[in-house]
Image (spheres, rainbow, N blue to C red):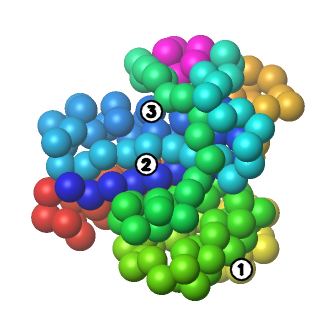
Amino acid sequence: MVKILFVCLGNICRSPLAEGILNKQLKDKGLEGKVSCDSAGTSTYHIGDDPDKRAIKTAKNHGCELSHKGRQITLGDFSTFDYIFAMDNENFKDVKALEKKAKDAGAVIRAKIYLTREFDNLYDDEVDDSENDIAWEVADPYHGSEEDFEECYDTLERCSTEFLKYLVKAHKL
């Protein structure tokens, strides 16, 4: 089974949305038993919390269900998951720092780490590969409006669609 982990700061907005979107796409394509996904945060802010109500509403409006409880990424996740997706540059740096700690602790690293928008078809040829480029980030809707959550959903859905195409081909699913 291929295992995917989505990571944002608090694990109540972007990463649970990404998890819900990919789970829906996997179900729609009959791939539920071949791929699993989860989400986590780099902070401890929302451990055990449900996703943000606006994230739940946005997902529901698109036929997705979010049933996640917030958790923090662990060193063990680097051995458990095949792919880890960070939502923005700061989280990417935090994930890479944790990966180094896991390696230093002797863990066998299985995960490939990406910025989520590396799979955004709108940016394939238009954006510099610099990890400092804000265009590679999935904007955090937490302090925004319902429209910001919709925009976040649209971005994550594009990324998930493209990643799923890659996954099917790379893993012969």
Of label 1 and label 2, which has the lower sequence position? Answer: 1
Q: Which residue is drawn at the image coordinates 30% and 46% (left, top)?
A: 36
Residues tagged 3 and 1 counted as in contact (Cβ below 8 A)? no
Which residue does the numbered mark 1 point to in the structure image? 130
Q: CA distance from mark 2 to mark 3?
A: 10 Å
Residue type of the residue flagged with mark 1:
Ser
In which quadrant is the N terminus drawn? bottom left
Q: Which residue is drawn at the image coordinates 43% and 48% (left, top)?
A: 160
The picture places residue 53, in percent across and down from the top left corner, at 67, 16
The picture places residue 42, in percent across and down from the top left corner, at 69, 53
Q: Is residue 51 visible?
A: no
Residues tagged 1 and 2 counted as in contact (Cβ below 8 A)? no
Main secondary structure type of the part rendered in magenta: helix
Q: Which residue is drawn at the image coordinates 68% and 74% (left, top)?
A: 97
Q: Dot 3, how many residues are within 10 Å of its Cα: few (below 14), some (14-19), or many (20+)?
A: many
Residue 3 figure quarter: bottom left
Whether residue 122 appears in magenta in the rendering, the answer is no
Q: CA distance from mark 3 to mark 1?
A: 28 Å
Residue extending furthest front? 105
Left or right, residue 138 beside residue 169: right
Residue 16 figure quarter: top right
Left or right, residue 62 beside residue 33: right
Which residue does the numbered mark 2 point to in the structure image? 160
Of label 2 and label 3, which has the lower sequence position? Answer: 3
Magenta range is: 56-62
Q: Is residue 45 above or below residue 117?
A: above
Q: Which mark is residue 20?
A: 3
Residue extending furthest right? 143
Q: Secondary structure at mark 2?
A: helix
Residue type of the residue flagged with mark 2:
Ser
Which one is nearer the viewer's eye here, 130 or 55?
A: 55
